[in-house]
Amino acid sequence: MIRSRHAVIGLGLTLVSLFPFSIALADGPTAERQGQLEHLLVQDCGSCHGLRLTGGLGPALTRSAIAGKPRDILIATVTHGRPDTAMPGWSALLSEQDIVWLVDRLIEGKSTP
């Protein structure tokens, strides 16, 4: 009984210690990081999707082009890529927070320079 109570207390303390981290994730990337991500969006994404993201080797990523596509699918695509296509997964280079910010930026239609 004492051992299980210690496990519950330990789990509770772990969860409480993660709470500030989850709040930080909700805030999104810093302004400096957002600038870096904007650059990545234009240069790296733009190299396949077109510099204005209107299409190229990859499909258009404009607001109208992705309208109606589920946000979680867009996030999964950026995270894991698309098999049998030129679309790589970006999870090795970008955090989950970065990827969510980029996808939200595209959904909002703020994708062109």
Image: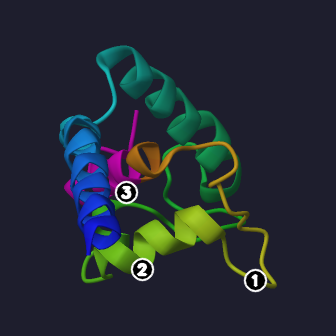
Q: State the SS at label 1.
A: loop
SS for tag 2?
helix
Q: Percent x, y for residue 28? A: 27, 37
Q: Is residue 54 above or below residue 27?
A: below
For image coordinates 70% across by 50% down, the residue present is: 92
* Left or right: residue 10 compared with residue 112: left
Q: Callout 1, which amino acid? A: Pro
Q: Is residue 102 magenta?
A: yes
Q: Residues within 10 Å of mark 2 (few under 14, many from 20)?
A: few
Residue at left 34%, top 54%? Answer: 106
Chain-order first, disc 2 or disc 1:
2
For the record, the magenta segment spans 100-113
Instruction: Return the disc, 1 or 3, that comes first in the chain's sequence.
Output: 1
Q: Which mark is residue 83?
A: 1
Figure coloring:
rainbow
Q: Quadrant of the N terminus?
A: bottom left
* Disc 2 from disc 1: Cα separation: 14 Å
Q: CA distance from mark 3 to mark 2?
A: 10 Å
Q: Amino acid at mark 3?
A: Val
Q: Amino acid at mark 2?
A: Ile
Residue density around tag 1, few if under 14, some if 14–19, many if 20 or more, within 10 Å: few
Q: Position of residue 32 (x, y in %)?
A: 39, 14
Does residue 84 lie above or below 22 as drawn? Answer: below
Residue labelled with disc 2: 73
Question: Image quadrant of residue 25?
Answer: top left
> Which residue corresponds to mark 3?
103
Above/below status of 35 relative to 18: above
Q: Which residue is at the front of the view, 26 or 60? A: 26
The quadrant of the picture occupied by the C terminus is: top left
